[in-house]
Amino acid sequence: MAPGLATAQAVEPPPLRAYGALPSLELVELSPSGDRVAFIGVSGEQRRLVLVDLKAGTSLSNVDIGAIKMRGLRWIGEDRVLVISTQTAAARHLGIDDSEMTAGQIFDVGSGRVTQMLANMRGTLPVLMSRVYVSTAQGDPQLLVRAFSTQHPERVDLYRVDPETGRGRLAEIMFPDVDDFVFDPMADRTSARGEYNSRSGEWTLRVRSDGGAYRQVWRTNAPIDVPSLVGLGPGGDSVIVAADRPDLDDAGSKSTRVFDVRLSSGEWRPLDFEFEPDSLVFHPLTGRLIGAERIDDDRRSYLFTDTDADRLWKHAEGVLADKSPTIVSWSDDLRQAILFTSGAGDSGTYYLLDLDSVALNEIGSAYPDIAPESVGSIRSFSYNAADGLEIPGYLTLPPGESGARNLPLVVLVHGGPASHDTLSFDWWAQAIASRGYAVLQPNFRGSTGYGDDFMEAGYAEWGRKMQTDLSDGVRRLAADGVIDPARVCIMGASYGGYAAMAGPTLDPGVYRCAVSVNGVSDLRRMVNDEARVREHRDNETVRYWNRFMGAERLGDRSLDARSPAKVAAQADAPMLLIHGRDDTVVPIEQSRVMAQALRIAGKPVEIVELDGEDHWLSRSDTRLRMLNETIAFLDRYNPPN
C-alpha cells in the first residue's frame, strides 16, 4: 500500500455511477408569488418536471418530459412553466451547420397540456435565438424571444409569443448585426440595442428615446473585446453596459468596466461596487439591477443596493454560516428564495428560505448517493509560477484523508480557458479523488475571476506559460511532500483537453499519462474551421483565438509548434482521447487527428468516441463511460497503490 493511503482506504467509495449520474435534482425555480416551486428530477437519462404547492404541501404535477438536454426552467405567471432544452441539429437551407439548437416547451399546470414555442408558424424557425423574457405589462404574461425568419433570412426578429398557443407575432425587426438588446418588462419594450459588424469590428450602442425611436449614443472599434449589454439599470431609466472605456477611467488604466448609461442623455457613469463583481443580479420581476455577486477563494458573497434583497441575503448568510450559499431563484417580493450549497462534506443541497415564517427547509440533494463522508476535502491551494506569478487553485484529497503525504496526483485542467474552477463539489474531481488520488485544479494565467491583468497574462501563452503553470503546481506539491512526483497524470476537457495533450508533448518529464476529453489538438485547424463556418473569415472569434493562442494572422504556422498533433513524436506518456460525436464546439476530428499522429509516431494512444454526446457531457451514460475509461486508464498507467 502506498504511503498516505491508509486513511483513504477506510472510506468505502461509492460506485462510479454515483458520480457519473446527472444531478438527480436540478433547475429549482420559485414561482413569482413564492407559493409554488418547479424543478427537474432526473433518473438515468429520463427527466421529470415536478411542480409542488408549497402552501398546501401537495404535488401539482409530476410529468415525464423524456431524455432531453435541459438548459433552463422559468415560471410564466403562476400557472405555466417554460422548459428550455437543446438538441444537436442543422438547418442547412438557412446556412446553419450542426449546432446546439434551443427549443421551448410551455407546460400548463392546470390542464397538463404542453405547447411548443414558435411551432406551426409559417416563415419562422422554431428555435430560440435569445434568452426568453416574460412581460406582464399587458395583463396576462407574454413571452418575447428572437427567432429566424425563413422569409427574411437576413433577419433574426423579436417575437411576442402567446403562452396559450405558442404562436408569436412580430414585435420588433432585428437584423443579425443586432447582437444584443435589453428588454424592459415593466415598459413592455426594448430599451437598448448593441449592433456589431463582425468584419469591421464596429460596435454601436443605440438607446430608445422617450418618443420611441432609437438613437446612437456611442460607437467604438472593438475587433476582439466586444462590448455587451448586461441589463436594466436600478431605476429602469438606464442600461448597464460592459465595455473598455479607458477614456472614462481617472487612472487611465485599460480595464473592462461596467457602466450605467442614461437613456435620456446617453451619459456614462462607472458602476462601482466594494468588490470587482463576477456577475450582476437583477430583480426577478422588474429586471432592474439590484446587486452584484463575487466568488472568492472560499465562499460566494453578494452586495445588494436593494434593501429587501440585502435583508434576505443577510438572513441566508446567518442560517448557513458554515456553508457558502448561492441564491438560485427567488419570489417577486424577495421574501422567499432557493439557495444551493456544495463543497466539503456536501455533494450539492437545495434549500428553501422563507423570511415570512423564518424557516429554512431542505428541498433535496443533487447527488443523494454520495454521502457527506464520501466527499473528499477541498481546500484552496496557491503557489508561485516559475516567473513569480501567484497561481490560485484547489486541492481535493481522497475521502477520509488527512495529513496527506506522497499521494498520486491528477492535475485536472478547466476549460475555457477564460473560465475558472471554484471551491465546490466537482463530480469529475470527486470521482477521481474517491479512487485514492489527490486532484489539483489550478486557475492558471488566462483564467477569469482574478482581474483583467491575470487573464491577459495568458494571451499568447497556449502551450507556454499557461502550460508550465500546471507543472509548477506539481513541483510545489512534490516539494511539500504531499504528492509523489513520479506518479502524476494530467487530464481535462475542452481547453483542458488541449492542456492534457500538451503535457506529454510540450512539457515533457512531468506526467505518466494524459486523458483529453473533447480537446483541441491542432490550433491552426481549429481557427481555420472557425473562419470557414462564419460569414466572414476575418471575424471576432478568429481574432479572439489568434490573440489568446499567439498567432499573428489567420493560418499562422507558428501555431504548429504548440499543437500537440503536430509534435506528437515528442509525446513521452500514453494518452487516452475521449470525444463526443455530436460536439459542435470542438469537432471530433481534433481527437481523431491526434490519435492518428500518435499512432504514426509509434506512441501509445487509445481513443473513445461517445455516440450522441455533445461538448458538455450532457448524458449520464456517456459521463459514466468517460469515468470508467478514465479510471481504468489511470489504474493501468498510474495505479494509486
Image (cartoon, rainbow, N blue to C red):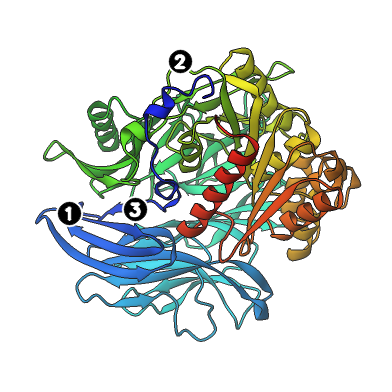
In the image, residue 64 lies at what x, y percent? 31, 69
Q: Is mark 2 on a helix, strand or loop?
A: loop
Q: Nearer the viewer, residue 409 or 632?
A: 632
Under mark 2, the amino acid is Gly
Return the x and y of residue 125 as percentages of the image width and height. 54, 78
Asked if one can make out residue 442 in the rendered structure from this viewpoint, the answer is no
Rendered residue at 53%/38% (across/down): 259
Looking at the image, do the residues carrying marks 2 and 3 touch, with CB atoms under 8 Å apart? Answer: no
Residue mark closest to the camera, 2 vs 3: 2
Looking at the image, tell me whether mark 2 or mark 3 is earlier in sequence order. Answer: 3
Q: Distance between the residues labelled 2 and 3?
A: 33 Å
**Which amino acid is tagged 1?**
Asp
* Whole-number angstrom distance, CA of label 2 to CA of label 1: 48 Å
Circle nearer the N terminus (2, 1): 1
Disc ID at residue 289: none
Is 191 left, or right, of 442 in this rendering? left
* Image location of residue 616, percent across then percent down: 55, 54
Residue 211 pos. (x, y %): 47, 61
The crowd level at tag 2 (other Cα within 10 Å; few <14, some 14-19, many 20+) is few
Q: What residue type is labelled 3?
A: Ser
Find residue 403 and name its label.
2
Question: Disc 3 designates what residue?
Answer: 24
Residue behind mark 1: 35
Query: Which residue sits at x=50%, y=47%?
Result: 230
Extreme residue toward the front, this view: 1
Q: In which quarter of the image is residue 257?
A: top right
- Looking at the rendered image, the quarter that the C terminus falls into is top right
Q: In this view, does 598 lie above or below 144?
A: above
